[in-house]
Image (cartoon, rainbow, N blue to C red):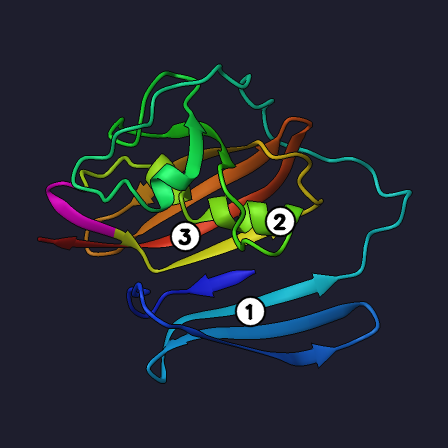
Amino acid sequence: MTVELPRPVPVAELTVRVRMLHAGRRTELLEGSLDCAGEPVLLARAWRVARSPATTPVLRPTEVPPSLPGPQPRPGMTGAHLEGYVSAIEWRFPDGGDFDSRGPGRVWARQRIPLLPTVADTPLTRALVLADSNWAVAFELDHHQQLVINTDVSLLLHRDPVGEWLCIRSATAASPDGSGVAAGSLDDREGDCGRILQTLLVAGR
């Protein structure tokens, strides 16, 4: 699933629209948008792919995730609003850091509250809720001196995540006269389950 963010999503009344673009025997392509006052603030496309055969080998080319640490205080993030998304997630940093620590970074996290009050969360929704924090876990650029913000997020899963706790391990790549990329691995307590990619806008303040 890839989510594009053409403008900030306001705290306001939003309209969700979803349609099927392709329905095949093995794949489906879905498209959705989140609109505010008739203008799109979020665009998404998602592929649904038939499950692989039981004979498919297990290939997980990443290192084993760090152990889940014990409870920690709420992490800091200088200049950020901490009472919304950040406080709705329980964060545990294996290295004892927070969002002000320079990456590459690693964090275990789980939702404190459901995404929707009347709908049970699924492995996909839990992964999507955390995926957008990938770029913040990867902070290596000085986001206090420069404007550093993601313009999109792509989540690719090779299997459904298991359980509430997910681990993001992420790093930043950037170049002068270019942009940035935050690339992360997603693990559950059984190991690797997917990847997260985000394009970063890097600009002067």
* Mark 3 nearby-residue class (10 Å; few <14, some 14–19, many ≥20): many
Residue at 53% x, 37% y is 185
Q: Nearer the viewer, residue 184 or 166?
A: 166
Disc 1 crowd, CA 10 A, few/some/many (<14, 14-19, 20+):
some
Q: Residue at x 69, y 27 (%)?
A: 190
Name the residue tied to disc 2: 121
Distance CA(mark 3)–CA(mark 1)? 15 Å
- Mark 2 and mark 1: span between their CA atoms? 20 Å
Image coords of residue 17 (percent x, y): 52, 78
Q: Give the mark, 2 or 3, whose residue is nearer the N terminus.
A: 2
The stretch in magenta equals: 144-148
For residue 45, the mark is 1
Q: Which of marks 2 and 1 is nearer the N terminus?
A: 1
Depth check, front residue: 10 or 205:
10
Farthest residue, direction front? 118
Where disc 3 sits, the SS reads strand
In the structure shown, which secondary structural element does the residue marked by tag 1 occupy?
Answer: strand
Image location (x, y in percent) of residue 80:
21, 42
Q: From what the image shows, is residue 34 above or below residue 186?
A: below
Picture quarter containing residue 59?
top right
